[in-house]
Every structure is written in structure tokens, then in C-alpha cells.
Amino acid sequence: MLPNFWSHPAAVRVFNKSAARLVLDTIRSLAIRPAYREFKPIEGNAGPRGELRPAVLRDVASALAEKMRRENATIITVVRQRRGGSARRPVADGYTGRAGM
């Protein structure tokens, strides 16, 4: 049986720090785009070492993911309309979708 990861405080701290870094790096890379500027203030509230509470990380990551899903759906709709409506769904090379996770 594997040990419970969450029972090790040091492991949880490393996980939370990595999660915060990932979310903040994502915000930095996306916030230059007009549709994502609303996320920029979160970076400023992260503290001097990029600390965010786990609940904030979850909420921000969820909001970013949902916004990206909506944006992707809009792009797919535009591509379909330009291809005549009955065209197949565009697929990125090597991407298998949710089923491939």
C-alpha cells in the first residue's frame, strides 16, 4: 500500500508551492492577451514569494481552464463555419482529447 501523500506536511508544502508557481506562470503568459487581463491582479496579490492559498489556486486554475475551454469552443465554431459547417472537428497533431488522458 502506498503512503498517504497528504499526511506528509513537507510534501504538501512542495505540492502547493509548485501549484502556485504553475498558476502564476500561466497567468503571466496569458495576461498579456486582452481576454485574460482580468487575471493580472491575482499575480500582484500573490505575495513576495508567490504564495497563494490552496483555495485561491483551485479557483483561479478552474476559472482559467473554463475560460480556455470557452475560447477553444469559439475557435472551433469559427473554423467550422469557415469550412462550411459540416467539416470535421479540427484536431491538433498528437492531441487525443479527454479520452486519451
Image: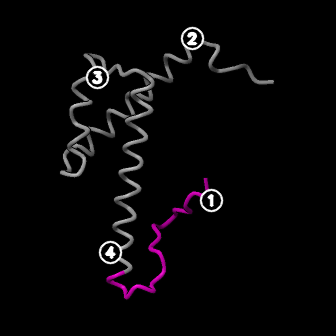
Residue 46 position, x and y percent, is 29, 22
Q: Amino acid at mark 4?
A: Val
Q: Residue at x 20, y 43 (%)?
A: 37
Q: Rounded to the nearest whole Å, what is the CA distance between mark 2 and mark 3? A: 21 Å
Q: How busy is the neighbourhood of tag 2: few (under 14 within 10 Å), some, or many (20 plus)?
A: few
How busy is the neighbourhood of tag 1: few (under 14 within 10 Å), some, or many (20 plus)? few
Q: Which residue is mark 3?
A: 46
Mark 4 vs 3, N-terminal side: 3
Mark toward the viewer: 4 or 2: 4
Report helix, strand or loop for mark 2.
Answer: helix
Number of numbered labels in the structure image:
4
Mark 3 vs 1, N-terminal side: 3
The stretch of residues the image draws in magenta is 81-101
* Amino acid type, mark 2: Pro
Sequence-first disc among 4 and 2: 2
SS at mark 1 in the image? helix
User: What type is the residue that disc 3 sits on?
Assistant: Ala
| 97 relative to 84 in the view: left or right | right
Q: Which residue has dot 1 on it? A: 99
First reached walking from the N terminus: tag 2 or tag 3: 2
Q: Are marks 1 and 2 in contact (CB under 8 Å)?
A: no
Nearest the viewer among 42 and 26 is 42
Marks 3/1: CA distance? 34 Å
